[in-house]
Amino acid sequence: MELIVIWVVLGPLIGYAIGKPKGREGYGLLLGLLLGFIGWIIVAVMEPAVGYSNVGPQSPRRACPFCYEQIQSSAVVCRYCGADVEPVLALTAKGVPFGWQITAKDYQQLQEQSPSGVQALLVACVEAGYPSFTSARLTSAVTDVDKGRLSPKQAVAKWGR
Ligand SMILES: [Zn+2]
Protein backbone atom coordinates (compact mmCIF):
# COMPACT_ATOMS: atom_id res chain seq x y z
CA MET A 1 0.00 0.00 0.00
CA GLU A 2 2.70 2.49 1.01
CA LEU A 3 4.60 1.60 -2.12
CA ILE A 4 1.62 2.62 -4.25
CA VAL A 5 1.33 5.94 -2.40
CA ILE A 6 5.04 6.62 -2.89
CA TRP A 7 4.71 5.71 -6.57
CA VAL A 8 1.70 7.92 -7.17
CA VAL A 9 3.11 10.92 -5.28
CA LEU A 10 6.83 10.73 -5.94
CA GLY A 11 6.61 9.40 -9.49
CA PRO A 12 5.05 12.52 -11.02
CA LEU A 13 6.87 14.91 -8.64
CA ILE A 14 10.33 13.69 -9.55
CA GLY A 15 9.32 13.45 -13.21
CA TYR A 16 8.20 17.07 -13.03
CA ALA A 17 11.47 18.16 -11.41
CA ILE A 18 13.52 16.40 -14.08
CA GLY A 19 11.42 17.78 -16.94
CA LYS A 20 11.05 21.37 -15.71
CA PRO A 21 14.48 22.80 -16.71
CA LYS A 22 13.93 21.47 -20.22
CA GLY A 23 10.35 22.68 -20.61
CA ARG A 24 9.13 19.05 -20.43
CA GLU A 25 7.38 19.18 -17.06
CA GLY A 26 4.11 17.92 -18.60
CA TYR A 27 5.81 14.79 -19.88
CA GLY A 28 7.61 14.47 -16.53
CA LEU A 29 4.33 14.47 -14.61
CA LEU A 30 2.63 12.01 -16.92
CA LEU A 31 5.51 9.59 -17.48
CA GLY A 32 6.51 9.74 -13.80
CA LEU A 33 2.97 8.75 -12.84
CA LEU A 34 2.55 6.03 -15.45
CA LEU A 35 6.03 4.51 -15.54
CA GLY A 36 7.74 5.59 -12.30
CA PHE A 37 11.50 5.54 -12.54
CA ILE A 38 11.40 4.37 -16.16
CA GLY A 39 9.44 7.54 -16.91
CA TRP A 40 12.11 9.61 -15.14
CA ILE A 41 14.78 8.11 -17.37
CA ILE A 42 12.75 8.83 -20.50
CA VAL A 43 12.27 12.45 -19.45
CA ALA A 44 15.94 12.75 -18.47
CA VAL A 45 17.14 11.76 -21.94
CA MET A 46 14.40 13.67 -23.77
CA GLU A 47 15.46 16.60 -25.99
CA PRO A 48 14.68 19.99 -24.40
CA ALA A 49 11.61 21.79 -25.74
CA VAL A 50 12.24 24.58 -28.27
CA GLY A 51 13.88 27.55 -26.54
CA TYR A 52 14.97 25.51 -23.52
CA SER A 53 18.47 24.46 -22.72
CA ASN A 54 20.06 22.36 -20.00
CA VAL A 55 22.62 25.01 -19.24
CA GLY A 56 20.56 28.01 -18.21
CA PRO A 57 19.05 30.86 -20.17
CA GLN A 58 22.29 32.83 -20.40
CA SER A 59 24.15 30.29 -22.48
CA PRO A 60 21.90 28.91 -25.20
CA ARG A 61 23.28 26.00 -27.19
CA ARG A 62 23.10 24.68 -30.70
CA ALA A 63 24.69 21.80 -32.57
CA CYS A 64 28.03 22.36 -34.30
CA PRO A 65 27.33 22.09 -38.05
CA PHE A 66 30.45 19.97 -38.51
CA CYS A 67 30.64 17.49 -35.62
CA TYR A 68 27.08 17.92 -34.19
CA GLU A 69 28.30 18.37 -30.60
CA GLN A 70 26.37 20.91 -28.51
CA ILE A 71 28.20 24.23 -28.38
CA GLN A 72 27.37 27.80 -27.28
CA SER A 73 25.19 29.67 -29.77
CA SER A 74 27.57 32.62 -29.59
CA ALA A 75 30.69 30.47 -30.18
CA VAL A 76 32.90 31.31 -33.17
CA VAL A 77 35.07 28.19 -32.80
CA CYS A 78 33.72 24.70 -31.95
CA ARG A 79 35.33 23.50 -28.74
CA TYR A 80 35.06 19.88 -29.82
CA CYS A 81 36.32 19.79 -33.41
CA GLY A 82 37.95 23.23 -33.63
CA ALA A 83 36.01 24.28 -36.74
CA ASP A 84 35.22 27.96 -37.36
CA VAL A 85 31.47 28.44 -36.91
CA GLU A 86 29.18 31.42 -37.33
CA PRO A 87 27.70 32.75 -34.08
CA VAL A 88 23.92 32.38 -34.30
CA LEU A 89 21.01 34.19 -32.76
CA ALA A 90 19.16 32.14 -30.16
CA LEU A 91 15.58 32.86 -29.18
CA THR A 92 13.79 32.09 -25.93
CA ALA A 93 10.55 30.10 -25.75
CA LYS A 94 8.72 33.44 -26.09
CA GLY A 95 10.46 34.17 -29.38
CA VAL A 96 12.62 37.03 -28.10
CA PRO A 97 16.43 36.97 -28.08
CA PHE A 98 18.12 35.45 -25.03
CA GLY A 99 18.74 38.00 -22.29
CA TRP A 100 16.19 40.48 -23.66
CA GLN A 101 13.64 40.94 -20.91
CA ILE A 102 10.77 42.08 -23.10
CA THR A 103 7.52 40.59 -24.33
CA ALA A 104 7.23 39.20 -27.84
CA LYS A 105 4.90 42.10 -28.65
CA ASP A 106 7.39 44.75 -27.50
CA TYR A 107 10.14 42.99 -29.41
CA GLN A 108 8.04 43.13 -32.57
CA GLN A 109 7.31 46.80 -31.99
CA LEU A 110 10.99 47.55 -31.52
CA GLN A 111 11.77 45.76 -34.78
CA GLU A 112 9.15 47.80 -36.62
CA GLN A 113 10.45 51.06 -35.19
CA SER A 114 14.07 50.38 -36.00
CA PRO A 115 14.77 47.25 -38.05
CA SER A 116 18.41 48.11 -38.73
CA GLY A 117 19.13 49.20 -35.13
CA VAL A 118 17.64 45.99 -33.71
CA GLN A 119 19.51 43.86 -36.23
CA ALA A 120 22.84 45.53 -35.46
CA LEU A 121 22.24 45.18 -31.73
CA LEU A 122 21.37 41.49 -32.10
CA VAL A 123 24.64 40.76 -33.87
CA ALA A 124 26.55 42.61 -31.13
CA CYS A 125 24.62 40.68 -28.44
CA VAL A 126 25.49 37.32 -29.97
CA GLU A 127 29.16 38.34 -30.13
CA ALA A 128 29.05 39.51 -26.51
CA GLY A 129 27.55 36.19 -25.35
CA TYR A 130 23.92 37.28 -24.71
CA PRO A 131 24.07 40.03 -22.09
CA SER A 132 20.90 40.79 -20.19
CA PHE A 133 18.75 43.84 -21.02
CA THR A 134 15.72 45.27 -19.32
CA SER A 135 13.06 46.69 -21.62
CA ALA A 136 14.01 50.32 -20.85
CA ARG A 137 17.74 49.72 -21.37
CA LEU A 138 17.02 47.95 -24.64
CA THR A 139 15.06 50.92 -25.95
CA SER A 140 17.95 53.22 -24.97
CA ALA A 141 20.47 50.94 -26.69
CA VAL A 142 18.46 50.77 -29.93
CA THR A 143 17.96 54.55 -29.90
CA ASP A 144 21.69 55.17 -29.38
CA VAL A 145 22.58 52.85 -32.25
CA ASP A 146 19.88 54.32 -34.48
CA LYS A 147 21.00 57.90 -33.95
CA GLY A 148 24.64 56.95 -34.45
CA ARG A 149 25.60 58.00 -30.91
CA LEU A 150 27.10 54.59 -30.15
CA SER A 151 28.27 51.63 -32.20
CA PRO A 152 26.23 48.45 -31.55
CA LYS A 153 29.16 47.06 -29.57
CA GLN A 154 29.36 50.20 -27.41
CA ALA A 155 25.60 50.18 -26.86
CA VAL A 156 25.74 46.58 -25.66
CA ALA A 157 28.60 47.43 -23.31
CA LYS A 158 26.79 50.50 -21.97
CA TRP A 159 23.25 49.18 -21.59
CA GLY A 160 23.66 45.41 -21.26
CA ARG A 161 24.39 43.61 -18.01
ZN1 LIG B 1 32.36 20.79 -33.94
Image (cartoon, rainbow, N blue to C red):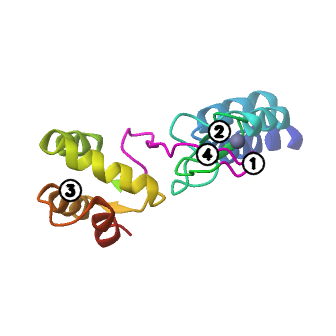
Residue that badge 4 annotates: 84
- Quarter residue 1 falls in: top right
Query: Does the residue tagged 1 have its C-beta within 8 Å of any atom of ligand 1?
Result: yes
Q: Among all residues in the image, which is located at the extreme bottom?
A: 158
Is 97 included in the stretch rendered in magenta? Answer: yes
Rendered location of residue 104, percent (x, y): 29, 41
Report the residue marked by disc 1.
Answer: 80
Tell me if label 1 and label 2 are in contact, CB under 8 Å: yes
> At label 4, which amino acid type do we have?
Asp
Q: Residue at x 48, y 58 (%)?
A: 129
Q: Earlier in the sequence, mark 4 or mark 2?
A: 2
Q: Would you say the residues marked 2 and 3 are in contact, meaning their CB atoms lie under 8 Å apart?
A: no
Mark earlier in primary sequence (1, 2)? 2
Residue 64's disc is: 2
Instruction: Determine the residue positioned at 65% across, 41% down.
Output: 19
Which numbered disc covers residue 142? 3
- Name the residue: 23% across, 62% down: 141
Which amino acid type is shown beneath numbered disc 2? Cys
Q: Earlier in the sequence, mark 3 or mark 4?
A: 4
Task: Look at the picture and state if 63 lies above or below 140.
Answer: above
Check whether the beta carbons of the residues at disc 4 and disc 2 lie within 8 A of each other. Answer: no
- Residue 70 sits in which quadrant? top right
Q: Along the line of sight, which residue is nearer the eye, 116 or 3? A: 116
Earlier residue among tags 1 and 3: 1
Mark 1 vs mark 4: in front: 4
| Magenta residues, dominant SS class | loop
Residue 102: in sight, yes or no? no
Looking at numbered disc 3 in the image, what kind of residue is underneath it?
Answer: Val
* Amino acid at dot 1: Tyr
Q: Which quadrant does the C terminus fall into?
A: bottom left
Element assignment for label 1: loop
Callout 3: SS: helix
